[in-house]
Each structure stands twice: as C-alpha cells, then as structure tokens.
Amino acid sequence: MLDVLPVFSGDARITRLFTLVPGSDFGADAFSAIDALGGRTVPWSEACGRSYDLIVAASPKGDLRLLRGPHVLIPHGAGFNKSIRGEGSAHSASGLDPAYLRRTHDRSPAALHALAHPDQIARLAAADPRAARRAKVIGDLTLERVLASTSLRDRYRAALGTGARKLLVLVSTWGPESLVRRHPGLPAQLVAQLPYDEYQLALVIHPNERSRLGTYELTERLARALDAGLVLPDPHEEWASVLIAADALVTDHGSAALYYCAAQDRPVVSVHQGGGELIPGSPMDILLDGIPRLSRAEEIADALRAYRPGPGHTAAQAAFAPAGEAMDRLRTEVYGLLGLAPPAHGVTPRLLPSPAPATRAPAAFDVHVATTTAGVRITRHPAGTGLPGHHLAVEHGAAAERFARSAALLYRRPLPASAAPVDLVWTADGWTRHALSAYPGCRSAAAVLPSGGCLLRVRGHERMYAAQVEPRSEAGRIVRIDPTIALSAVHARLISPQPAAPDSASVLNCLVGERTFRITLRPATDAEAAQAIQGPSDGP
C-alpha cells in the first residue's frame, strides 16, 4: 500500500487515511509501520461510519463492503502463487479467491481491479467474471521501486558492511510450508558452513511470520545466527534493498524471490519441499521448477554453482508486465475515479532506503589454517558455530571473557579518542605484554593500530613484529581485508617450528577464499612499539 500511495504525492486536494480491516491474525505490526511514518489511522468502527472519495485495498478479504466509496483493489505480493489452507475456496489462489471476490462485489463492486500481468486477467475471469470486467493491467509498483533503486546496490552493500563478501539472502514466506517453519535451523547451519570472510548472510521474513512470533521471540529463535552476524532487515522497505544488494538467494515458494529475479539474474536455489500451497503453473512454480534444490546446508556451494541463468527471468516475465509505466497508469485510473485532473508535476518511484547492518557481530573466531606452496590459507568461522580450528582468535574488549581466556591469539583494536581531561592510553608494547601476562593460555597478543598496521608479540620471543597487509587491485576496485585476518596468518607462521622468525622484512601470502593478499612481516622498531593504540584526539 505504501508503494502505491505516492501516486497522490504533492496533491493538497488529497487526504490519506489508514484503517485496518478486522479479522487478520497479523494486524498489530501493520499499524506499527503506519505509526512509524506518522500516518493518520482511523478505527474500523469510525471508518465504516462515513463515505470516501476513494478506497484503496491490497486484499479482497474481510468486510471491505462496509466501506462506502469507489473501491480500488491492488495486487498483494507478486504472481498469485499460493493458496491458503482452510481459508476461502479450496485450491484458489490467495487474492483471486472467488469466495472473497464475490462477497465483496455483491455489495460494493470494485471500480478498478489493478493487476500486474495480462495473464492475471484470465485468472481473475475464471474466479469472478464480474470482477474481470473492471480489471486492468497496471503493473507492480513495488517492482518499480526495486528497479528504480538498482543503481544504489553499492550503497546498500556498504550500509550492510558486506564489502567484498558474497551476500547470501534467505527469503521466507509465512505459514506451515515456509522456510522458517520447515527449516528453522537453516540460518545457523549456513553460518557454520560458510566462511565469515567470504559470505554475509541475511534473512528476509514475511511480516505475517514476524507478527505471529513477535520481534523478541523471533530474535531469540535466531540467536545463534544473529550472534554470528546474520542481518535481519526490517520487513517494511529494507527487505527490498537487501534483495538488490544480494549475490545469491535461497527461497521457499514465497513471491519475494520474483522481485529479486526481475532485478537481476544471479543464483537462486530452492528449499521448497512441496505441499498444498503452491499453485501449479504460477510464476513461483515456474521458478522453482527450473532452479537447483538445496537439501542440506552442507550442499550450499554446490547448489549455487549448479544455477544456470534463465529461470529467474522467465518467472519474472510471467509475474510482471513490462516495467516502467505502472505509476503513470495507476495515477491516470485513480484520478479518473476521483473526477480530478492529476497535478501537472509528474511522479516517480521513491528510492528504497539503505538497510541497517547486523545488530551483532562476532568477535571470536575459530580459525582454520592450511599451509600451501602459495601461502597460508585462513578460513574463519564465528566461535562455537562449527568445529574448532587451528587456533581461537579473539578481540579483547569485544568478546566475552570466557573466549579471551581460551584465545591463542588475542588482539585489540584502537579505541575511540577520549574526551577525558587527563587521558590514559596503552602503548602497543605495554598492552601486548599485559595481555600475555594476564592470559597465560594466550600464545600471541597483537594491537591493531589506527593506521591499519599491526604489532604482534609472541610468547617466548624477545622482539615484537610489525605486520602490514597490502590491498589488492581487482577490476578497477581496491580490495582490503580486516587486519585481524592477516594477524591469524602471521600468528600461524610465528608459532610454527618452521620457518624461523624473520630477522628482516619478509613477505607472507595470505589466502582468503579465491584472493591472495601480501603481508609484509618484519621486526618492529622501538618507536612503533611505543605507539598508542587509540584514535587521535579531536581536542586541543
């Protein structure tokens, strides 16, 4: 609904009011979204007591006939792909169910039934011939926003903190056949399976499922994955921004995947296991029939590699009319119903907002190390999500103390500048000596400097070492890694019996996924060891 209403933007003759048709089990969060925007809501009892110049609804369900005024029915979701068990007519597509369409049209026939694709007119005619007489192909205004926002992909990825990683997004519809009901452990399983420095995960959940559980219960159920950095976008607009940012998708039979496929042809795999909800021949049925199926989290890499371009584009073509004119078409129709001339100014789809980053980030990692002729391969997983690795690397001051007590590599990042009138700051030498003394099980202690370089002290070694990782150039871009990844490579080399610690500058190759980064390793100078591990002060 909020994607549709901008057709009236800038028109002082129009007053927008919101009401919620009773009967939904998922209504509470709908009002929350309107309240967050400052929209004026009207209680249902009050809404039924007056007449309106136009009534816009996103579903034929409920007692819409009690609202007096010309009705406009707009698409809800994309493609009419699902039937809802125990609701309306058996095996009818939700949104095209004759049980609801006829009940509504008997008393208050829609002045306009807006549809997103020409094929949907035939489907509507089969469900309710009277409704089809007032149907027109308008297009999908949510898709218009998605397509208008595709150039913001880099901005969205920066907001999410994706970087050079691949963003894998899981999308779940609602109900007993949804991803979150049938595969509740999949997010945590994928977190354990995919290297943290190569993949970022996000989960887009249908608002009904979020409303059913409540935010607190949902986040508690997803706690393991959220602690490991899972992104859980807001269900109002952020979900679409995240789809634009995505590199790959895991979907059930919900229609969100069709917006992803319409915007780009990138890998998509299915976890749908069948059932009675998916409508045969619908756009989602076309998509799911042509993409790889994921049976176990361990097979995710193979499933993504098995995707071949084409099915997503075909399914999107079956769901959406050619994009670009939906807002103008709808604007013409609704102003005609109002008997008003549209304002002289045009309207364009509003760009989607940037999504919020993950609310939690891991600060302790099980680090797997493989020494090859090409260098040292580092693969990190959030601690406790999978098997222990070569060593446990922990950020002091960000991870729980139990992780710090077990760390083989303990590191500290720069603290923000202090506003204290008399400040107290660790030097790299002082903190690494303190850490090795305070944590007897620790083999190496390191400080990440504000410059991005690192200083590391190994238990039993007389000297400190300086490590600097070089960025790499890649197709016109610069790729950098978190210096703490390089610290794990240096730690693995220096605690190994061979080769010996360097007496002068040497180069160590660090392999992360398919990329190789050069690390310069050398003994640290006294001046470097005396550096403060804190950001520069902004004060006098």
Image (spheres, rainbow, N blue to C red):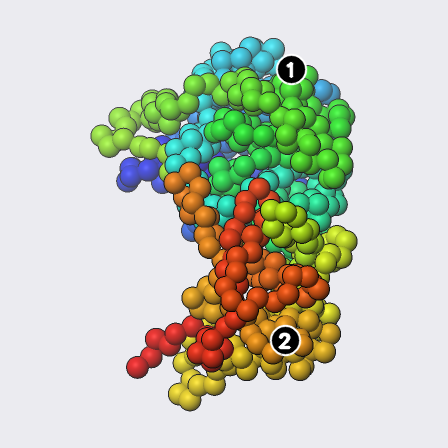
Q: Can see residue 82?
A: no
Residue 524, compared with residue 51, is above or below; it is below
Residue 150, compared with residue 198, is above or below; it is above
- Where is the C terminus found, in terms of image quarters? bottom left
Of the two numbered discs 2 and 1 on the same chain, state the one appearing first in sequence: 1
Q: Position of residue 397 (x, y in %)?
A: 59, 72
Horizontally, residue 101 falls left or right of residue 354, namely right
Disc 2/disc 1 C-alpha distance (Å): 69 Å
Q: Position of residue 485 (x, y in %)?
A: 58, 57
- Residue type, mark 2 in image: His
The residue identified by callout 2 is 461
The residue identified by callout 1 is 281
- Residue type, mark 1 in image: Gly
Residue sitting at x 52%, y 26%: 265
Q: Are marks 2 and 1 in contact (CB under 8 Å)?
A: no
In this view, the residue in front, 59 or 200, is 200
> Quadrant location of residue 431?
bottom right
Residue sitting at x 67%, y 36%: 301
Q: Position of residue 308 (x, y in %)?
A: 60, 22
> Quadrant location of residue 125?
top right
Tell me the SS state at disc 2: loop
In this view, the residue in front, 197 or 522, is 522
Q: Any mark on residue 119, and which?
A: none
Residue sitting at x 61%, y 14%: 127
Q: Nearer the viewer, mark 2 or mark 1?
A: 2
> Quadrant location of residue 503?
bottom right
Horizontally, residue 472 falls left or right of residue 281, namely left
Label 2 CA crowd tier, 10 Å (few <14, some 14–19, many 20+): few
Q: Position of residue 171 (x, y in %)?
A: 62, 37
Residue sitting at x 73%, y 74%: 441
